[in-house]
């Protein structure tokens, strides 16, 4: 087992990893930018190293600084969390070259699954259902038009290097195709330095359902059931739950085994997520693979009574998995609490938290790095907390979430707590009747 792990991240996920490491008797090293001097992950780690100024590309994305911090503290492993360098093949490779274990996927695995076009080709070869569309990158507009005609409208143009909804365009007819093609490529080039595009059939009334998998160094994998991530705004998840209210046992088994087949086909090591689009007829299609821990992993922790961070560390240390597949015994919901104003188009709201009261009680978990007096910097993602409730049934979990949200007081900044309160009272959400289009018709009412 590792003696010391450096956490190449910040905020709640860094604190989450530190807690598990301490429970496992592993020393921890925090890295931080000058904007995060007062962050809790710096306070609770055994050691902390400043790696640069506030901009991410000068600190949390600065690979030489992170490797140097690992070397001077004699860390024998690095956990990247999510975001930042967690799916950076070059970082994984450099860790290996420096004799430091990267707690995540290998460079080869990240390269194979990180590019959406090559990932789709790999999954087709593995026999996993994929959305109909182009075979690889579309070379020019003429090919784009031909693929759209063959696939049948509506179609979705996607950037191969995309993420967070960037470089994506839904196209409903041929007369809209050229404009969508040009604008998607421009946006992708600006965001990722890459304007390669591919095309898929647009799945109507889709649900975004992902399967959590863990693979060990022997090439064996297991799944830990699903998470429904369909409540999204601009392709950014707002809340998640497990089990999905849309899921049946037969569909869970089928999707779970497809995800395991995908992981074992590529000899995947570590925790990862196979993401699917599921249509109203319960047909499912591979969308992408995330070769890292997910923001929403705590709800899986809760319903299968598993610590996924612990599993990541054990697998990275060479400990084999049990091979058992896990199914939810409870119901868990996560609300992402962001420093955003839901009454003003979810506009970011950085600043000082003047007062904070955290909810508690049976079945309530709060993963956060903020506290009263903490200043939220404007440099990073706006998520400040994850509120998780777990109960025997979905109805009880929703009721518990309503109560917890009403207890959660954050003053000095605007947060998405009012949005989540209204979501928990929305009749379609209560009925489990929602798709990825839910937010298109959702309007905030004054409280």
Image: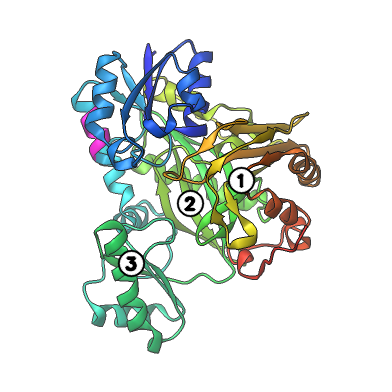
Q: Position of residue 70 (x, y in %)?
A: 29, 20
Image disc number at residue 222: none
The color scheme shown is rainbow
Q: Is residue 245 above or below residue 272?
A: below
Name the one closer to the observer, 187 or 118: 187
Lower sequence index among marks 2 and 1: 2
Query: Badge 3: how crowded within 10 Å, few (<14), some, or many (20+)?
Result: some
Apparent side of residue 47 relative to residue 383 in the rendered image (left or right): left
Does the magenta segment cover residue 14? no
User: The N terminus lies in which quarter of the figure?
Assistant: top left
Element under disc 1 = loop
Is 371 positioned to the left or the right of 159 in the image?
Answer: right
Q: Is residue 94 magenta?
A: yes
The residue at the far left in this view is 97
Q: Earlier in the sequence, mark 1 or mark 3?
A: 3
Tell me which corner region of the image, top left, top right, bottom left or bottom right, holds residue 118: bottom left
Query: Residue 187, labelled with which disc?
Result: 3
- Residue with the mark numbered 1: 413
How many residues crowd around disc 2 within 10 Å: few (fewer than 14), some, or many (20 or more)? many
- Residue beneath the point at 67% across and 62% down: 434
- Which mark lies nearer to you, 2 or 1? 1
Nearer to us: label 3 or label 2: 3
Q: Which residues are magenta?
A: 90-95
N-terminal-most mark, 3 or 2 = 3
Contact between marks 1 and 3 (CB within 8 A): the answer is: no
Give the Cα distance between marks 2 and 1.
Answer: 33 Å
Q: Secondary structure at mark 2?
A: strand
Residue 298 seen in the figure: yes
- Badge 2 vs badge 1, beta-carbon distance below 8 Å: no
Residue 275 marker: 2
């Amino acid at each position: 087992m590792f003696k010391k792990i450096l956490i190449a991240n910040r905020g709640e996920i860094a604190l989450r990893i530190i807690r598990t490491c301490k429970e496992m008797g592993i020393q921890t090293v925090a890295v931080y930018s000058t904007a995060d001097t007062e962050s809790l992950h710096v306070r609770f780690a055994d050691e902390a190293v400043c790696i640069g100024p506030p901009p991410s590309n000068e600190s949390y994305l600065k690979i030489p600084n992170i490797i140097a911090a690992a070397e001077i503290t004699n860390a024998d492993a690095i956990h990247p969390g999510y975001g930042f360098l967690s799916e950076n093949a070059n970082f994984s490779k450099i860790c290996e070259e420096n004799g430091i274990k990267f707690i995540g996927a290998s460079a080869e695995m990240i390269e194979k699954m990180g590019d959406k076009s090559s990932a789709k080709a790999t999954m087709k070869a593995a026999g996993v259902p994929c959305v109909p569309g182009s075979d690889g990158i579309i070379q020019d507009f003429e090919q784009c038009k031909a693929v759209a005609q063959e696939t049948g409208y509506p179609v979705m143009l996607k950037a191969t290097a995309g993420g967070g909804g960037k470089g994506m365009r839904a196209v409903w007819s041929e007369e809209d195709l050229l404009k969508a093609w040009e604008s998607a490529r421009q946006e992708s080039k600006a965001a990722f330095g890459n304007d390669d595009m591919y095309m898929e059939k647009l799945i109507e009334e889709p649900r975004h359902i992902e399967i959590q998998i863990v693979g060990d160094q022997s090439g064996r994998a297991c799944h830990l059931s699903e998470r429904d991530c369909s409540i999204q705004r601009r392709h950014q998840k707002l809340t998640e739950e497990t089990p999905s209210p849309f899921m049946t046992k037969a569909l869970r088994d089928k999707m779970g085994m497809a995800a395991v087949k995908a992981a074992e086909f590529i000899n995947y090591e570590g925790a990862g997520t196979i993401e699917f689009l599921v249509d109203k007829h319960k047909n499912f299609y591979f969308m992408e693979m995330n070769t890292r821990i997910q923001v929403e992993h705590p709800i899986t922790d809760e319903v299968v009574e598993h610590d996924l961070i612990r599993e990541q560390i054990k697998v990275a240390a060479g400990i084999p998995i049990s091979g058992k597949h896990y199914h939810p015994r409870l119901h868990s919901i996560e609300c992402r609490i962001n420093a955003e104003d839901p009454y003003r188009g979810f506009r970011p709201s950085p600043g000082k938290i003047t007062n904070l009261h955290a909810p508690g009680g049976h079945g309530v978990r709060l993963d956060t790095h903020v506290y009263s007096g903490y200043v939220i910097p404007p440099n990073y993602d706006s998520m400040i907390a994850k509120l998780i409730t777990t109960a025997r049934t979905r109805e009880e979990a929703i009721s518990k979430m309503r109560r917890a949200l009403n207890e959660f007081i954050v003053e000095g900044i605007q947060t998405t707590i009012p949005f989540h309160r209204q979501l928990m009272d929305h009749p379609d959400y209560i009925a489990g009747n929602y798709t990825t289009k839910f937010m298109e018709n959702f309007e905030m009412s004054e409280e």
